[in-house]
Amino acid sequence: MAKQKLVYFFGGGKTEGNATMKDLLGGKGSNLAEMTNVGVPVPPGFTISTEVCKAFNDNNRKYPKELDDQLQSNLTKLEKLMGKKLGDDKDPLLVSVRSGAAVSMPGMMDTVLNLGLNDISVEGLASKSGNERFAWDAYRRFIQMFGNVAMGLDLDVFEDILADLKAKKKVDDDTDLTGSDLKELVGLYKKAYKKAIKKDFPQDPMDQLRASIGAVFGSWNNDKAVKYRKLNDIQNLIGTAVNVQSMVYGNFGDTSGTGVCFSRDPSTGKKVFYGEFLMNAQGEDVVAGIRTPLKIDGLKKINKPAFDELVAIKNMLEKHYSDMQDMEFTIESEKLFILQTRNGKRTGAAAVKCAVDMVAEKMISKSEAVMRVSPDQLDQLFHPMIDPKFRKELTVLAKGLNASPGAASGQIVFSADDAEAWVKDGKKVLLVRKETSPEDIGGMDAAEGILTSTGGMTSHAAVVARGMGTPCVAGCKDVVVSGKVMSVAGKKYKEGSVITIDGTTGEVFAGEVKLINPKITKDLELFLGWADEIRLKAKRDGIKEKGFKVRTNADQPEDAKVARKLGAEGIGLCRTEHMFFEAEKLELFREMIVATDLEARKVALKKLLPMQKKDFVGIFKAMNGLPVTVRLLDPPLHEFLPNSAKDIKELAGKLGLKPAELQKKVESLHEMNPMLGHRGCRLGITYPEIYDMQVEAIMSAACEVAKKKVVVEPEIMIPLVGTAKELEILVENAKVVIAEVFKAKKMKVKHKIGTMIEIPRAALTAEKVAQHAEFFSFGTNDLTQMTYGYSRDDIGSFVGEYMDQGVLPKDPFQTLDAEGVGQLVEMAVSKGRSTRDNMKMGICGEHGGDPESIDFCYHAGLNYVSCSPYRVPIARLAAAQTVLKAAK
Amino acid sequence: MAKQKLVYFFGGGKTEGNATMKDLLGGKGSNLAEMTNVGVPVPPGFTISTEVCKAFNDNNRKYPKELDDQLQSNLTKLEKLMGKKLGDDKDPLLVSVRSGAAVSMPGMMDTVLNLGLNDISVEGLASKSGNERFAWDAYRRFIQMFGNVAMGLDLDVFEDILADLKAKKKVDDDTDLTGSDLKELVGLYKKAYKKAIKKDFPQDPMDQLRASIGAVFGSWNNDKAVKYRKLNDIQNLIGTAVNVQSMVYGNFGDTSGTGVCFSRDPSTGKKVFYGEFLMNAQGEDVVAGIRTPLKIDGLKKINKPAFDELVAIKNMLEKHYSDMQDMEFTIESEKLFILQTRNGKRTGAAAVKCAVDMVAEKMISKSEAVMRVSPDQLDQLFHPMIDPKFRKELTVLAKGLNASPGAASGQIVFSADDAEAWVKDGKKVLLVRKETSPEDIGGMDAAEGILTSTGGMTSHAAVVARGMGTPCVAGCKDVVVSGKVMSVAGKKYKEGSVITIDGTTGEVFAGEVKLINPKITKDLELFLGWADEIRLKAKRDGIKEKGFKVRTNADQPEDAKVARKLGAEGIGLCRTEHMFFEAEKLELFREMIVATDLEARKVALKKLLPMQKKDFVGIFKAMNGLPVTVRLLDPPLHEFLPNSAKDIKELAGKLGLKPAELQKKVESLHEMNPMLGHRGCRLGITYPEIYDMQVEAIMSAACEVAKKKVVVEPEIMIPLVGTAKELEILVENAKVVIAEVFKAKKMKVKHKIGTMIEIPRAALTAEKVAQHAEFFSFGTNDLTQMTYGYSRDDIGSFVGEYMDQGVLPKDPFQTLDAEGVGQLVEMAVSKGRSTRDNMKMGICGEHGGDPESIDFCYHAGLNYVSCSPYRVPIARLAAAQTVLKAAK
């Protein structure tokens, strides 16, 4: 049997590994190998494979027999290559021992630096570097790290000694200790080590090495690493690799230095060399901000060969990885080393710019470009943001849910009416409420942003704000609203005070903050066009219609126009009830609700009809040529009536009723669980005249615009269906009305009648429901509520705990629960198509704008997703990425 | 090709049909044939098959060619047998033409009597009967019926003529018209007929016959018949048969008569000949109650041969049909004819008595006996009833839902406290409330019965009342409760007024009504023993445990004892929260809820622990040897706090809080949709200390009783699980507590930990949930709420309309919806057993006591059903019947 290879060398232009060997060598190890392969000057070393980790941990922390030989031979090779020896008294080789699993787990496992120092080699390092202080500091750090990592000594043991010494020397900072102080410290450290471990600090570098490797392998199973893997759902890894790499020092003297650079500007994406460095410094000095780093161009003057080499390397690496690179480098005694390269993190704008440029440069294909921008990055481009330059200076006042992205500043007001009034006076306001209700729509629309103290991601405020594209922080529990005052952490903010909210992060700040408005560039349009091309030609087995479309949820012509500009290919959900909340319509609608008999109800409805029709005319015109799904009345009637005694009295006056009568009506409509109450198609069955009016309004509007050459295709959608019979009755009713309209208008218009699938029972019996439905639209908000038994309005009291304890991996109202709710969707798709094989199906719940949910919808076989207007571009991108991933 | 046989003769001891030919001859036709076959003197005739009906209706109301020949030959045969001829001027044969489908559709289709009368034969009938008035009355009735049924004339045409004639003759009643008046009437009828039809009234009996047969066949498709079949789900019938039968008359003179008799007493079931008759009368006279009928024994004196023959026939028919017979007979001129026999309807008591006696008489097997009593009949035996003798005299004040069976009279009170106080003073009270809440338990228990004006079949009042076996009428909308007054239809009933409710029918009566208390007899015990034998030995494919068991839902030792006496084989649901509503516990529980930190909560829980333990000790003792499933806390915490300002103030005082503080707590716990809120295992996750206390109480109690030789097997049930993870966490927590109890008690007790399946998602992911559950119990109340999206508390506003329009065939909270909810149950059973193949599964929702749902549960593979104590016998019977039906 061939001896198993356990150790892989890299350095001197030759390696035994490459980028494809992540599982065996870990991310870091395979990347070091890859860089070495392509000629990048990486400090040489070798990687001990993940299989050793597994063997070590499985086998009671014993190494495989073969390891020691392979370790020894690789070390010898390294020493030969470097021309230095571990533990040498003149010019010792020093190495680092680092973890590196196939998936990055930053900070979770252990590292040992400066290994190879002992009482003899420290003198060699001192004389070679010409810096005694540097050498002894390195030695004392090594003892500390080794003692802690390899021997499990408490770091406090060392920190206490250091503190005592500083007191004795009367200095404040570590950096004030001299070389001889540090030499004294090393003595004290070794004494403490011996006291605790009952052995001298090991002087043999091989002993140091074996113990350190074992410690790193062992750290794979420490508590925080195990927890991190669990939380991040990292599975199927056998262990970490260990990288033993020769040390290089940027603080070796004035010809040494260290820095970070990007192959393109990570903020803008422009193709310029971007970076910072410091001479005679360690990597952490660049980050810490004690000294001001120099711009990367400055290196040209200090060390032109190194600069030129760096430029050549970044060009080569960018080409090699076909992506913008983020590199760490060190110059030790004039010689350049690359410590790390990775694909650089970037802003949304930069991501788009890079992707588009790289296609132009023929570095990547359009498909690759589409995969290069994450939907979240794209989202940044559609909302004002807090200028990152000022962000650091801000103190967070409170933090709530990031309910609708974008930032906004303004004067706070506490009622929707005030918001409208103040805005009319030319002020910029933020609406602050405990929670919002449908009556607040006007004020919400007027406000720059919305802040609520209760409610979740799918509360009224959150849903409406996202629909409007208005920034919103919801469920901000630290904010207490009382009258016209908002208190946060004991401080009071009166009406008119200025605050800023960031709906992208959920943060609230005092005062005004400078915002920047990202703009939609030509690059972005080009980029999204590529995404559209991909998703529109997607073909799936068993699904007749080609493509995967994106529609929008819009209730008003204005919203429809915005969404269309953002690329919506139709309306997936037009909620007719939002139309009723405008003052005039609301009054008539209330008249209809309090009517005591059918005739009175019909009178009120007749007055509403022309108004509803006008709304539809506007929407149909805005969506000329695209389908529009109109949902008939959904919420329970009591949502349209006031609750407070004052409001009831006022309304009673208007309607010519006694307040007591109206009070009684309001009470009679009260429900214990309105979510599960008398709403949706249940109203259509019990008050058929309401749906009749709505159907008449929709179809009359359609006929009128069709006469004016507008291409219109209304899809009438019946909500909350739980039984096929409900739909059968309501479809029959609708057909009668439609026939009457066509007869009166002497024309016909293409149209469909379908249903929401939002009740579990509808999904379970979808083959029967489909007998009466020409399309299905999944209302996954309600479907999630009922499948989990969670009220969106009440989930706040336990959802935090549920996420913390891992009961819910994600908020199921944000990302569709594929395991449970998804089963019902898949069932309904398959049962529905068993009845009508070419049935059009889409989703109109909030999930329609969530990339992970969009991915689910594609695989479940839906024809389109529908989301709020400002999510449309994100959905277009996410849909294209799903198509690309599925094609693999 | 052989000519198709379309007409089947019966009479003269010979027939061409029999009891098995229902599909072809209809129920009536096959029964007439069967009786003729066994020698019963049935008026002869013939049956035209259902195939003719189909051909007639399919073929534009044309008869098959062959029919006329067959009709003619059968008529000739009939005339020969009867020695009379249709249309004869001396002694004419008269026939009836009646419908009769395979399934009885009483009153839905048409009938023609006295066919064969014309201007000549009427004289023959007059002379033969010696009663001119009788003959002309028969003729005018025939014209009226024929005109209406066969020719579609409006009955009003004839009624108007009759009214005019009565006015002219100055008489009030039809019976005051003389023979010659009726002769005059016939003349007027014929004139009217001719005016409308433009033809003379047909004098040829064959014309009369053909038209009448066609009319009856045609009535198969009249509106009411079609609707009746739709409503009663009568499918797969091709049409009705038509029976042409010679008429016999009980009002032919003093030697004629008519009556109804039963082979056993239908009230008591005793084996005595029971019946009533009238001489010189028609069947309707016996029913109408104008003359007082004689007891059947009286016939012996009047016509001994006929009486003896009747006794012999009833004995023979009872034996032939192996069941108690309900017969109609007529004596025409001393000769006995049997017009109809069928299995007699009987009371519950009679059903049991008959079944037990017939087994003793070796008429039927035990299995047959078990099938002979319907669960509804059995239910009568467990509740006081309104004495049927007085029922007719009562006026119904209002009608609500029959929420909990049995009748009760008492003085009305309007609060639970008053109920308790009045009962302490020795009064009998009925508790009248808008709706009840958990705090009303004491008063509900004290009251004789409960009446609520709102709420459905599964409202709090209904569920609790059924559990207690207390009669309840719920959701009685006509009753308006305001302060201490109840108004019904404008009349006011003050506190202290006496009313009576019948929870079996939902009726409310003013004043006291005499009630009778059925008692549990030895016969019943014997009978239920047979049922138990059948269900306990039932075996099903793929289900390891034999038998189909019946458990009970009981929260208190007293309930448990009652249920055990009624045959419960364990407790399927012991709701721990009901225990908290006793005053002392409620106070401590509230202290726990308002506690602001964990420590304070634990202090309150520690005080509750011994009280909970005591409850469990009582229940375990009562159920010695049987399993007890205890559900941990389920309702949301706000259910335990008061709502009114007054109550809040009072409680705040007790708890040493400021009312405003408590008010704030109450508000913070308020939920929009409590049904979908922070309850069940969600409380267990967020406040683990509550479940820990409950588990400790259960297991400590179990250990204590086990030491006293009580055989105990607690099954700890975790409610409202929607994800496997919830259960995993809570089972782990429970195991820790159990281990501590066992350690402290130095012993172990057999136990299980399982879960409710009541959230759709739990059913969908049951294979994962089952990894942590040792049993499943289906909470089909909540499962129905979530699968349909119906709130039990709010469904009242539309469920009536839904049943009327056929959207819901039944109230899904009474009978489990097999089509939708049932799918989830079946899915969970199969997924659950895919993880644990011998997993015990049961149902503890209200459906556990509903026969149709029990049938579903058996086929779904559940091991037991659990229902309220007083439903246990009904469930035992229903379960046995299900097993018997499945075995077929």
Image (cartoon, coloured by chain):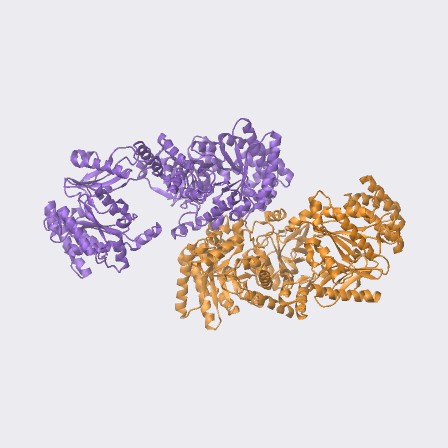
Chain colours: A purple, B orange
Above-or-below relation of A819 to B586 = above
Query: Which one is nearer the viewer's eye here, A543 or B744?
Result: A543
- Left or right of B761 on screen, residue A155: left
Q: Percent from the top left, x then y, of residue B38?
A: 74, 63
Query: Which one is nearer the viewer's eye here, A816 or B579?
Result: A816
For residue A204, which quarter of the picture? Answer: bottom left
- Left or right of B631 on screen, residue A731: right
- Left or right of A827 on screen, residue B746: left
Q: Percent from the top left, x then y, of residue A672?
A: 54, 49
Above-or-below relation of A412 to A822 = above
Query: Which one is nearer the viewer's eye here, A392 or A333?
Result: A333
Above-or-below relation of A689 to B242 = above
Q: Quadrant of the C terminus of chain B?
A: bottom right
Q: Tally the numbered discs.
A: 0
- Left or right of B830 on screen, residue B238: right
Q: Percent from the top left, x then y, of residue B419?
A: 60, 60
Q: Percent from the top left, x then y, of residue A55?
A: 26, 57
Q: Going by the picture, which residue comes out furthest to the front?
A: B1
In this view of the protein, can residue B123 be seen by the observer?
yes
For residue B427, which quarter of the picture? Answer: bottom right
In this view of the protein, can residue A172 be seen by the observer?
no
Q: Going by the picture, which residue comes out furthest to the top?
A: A708
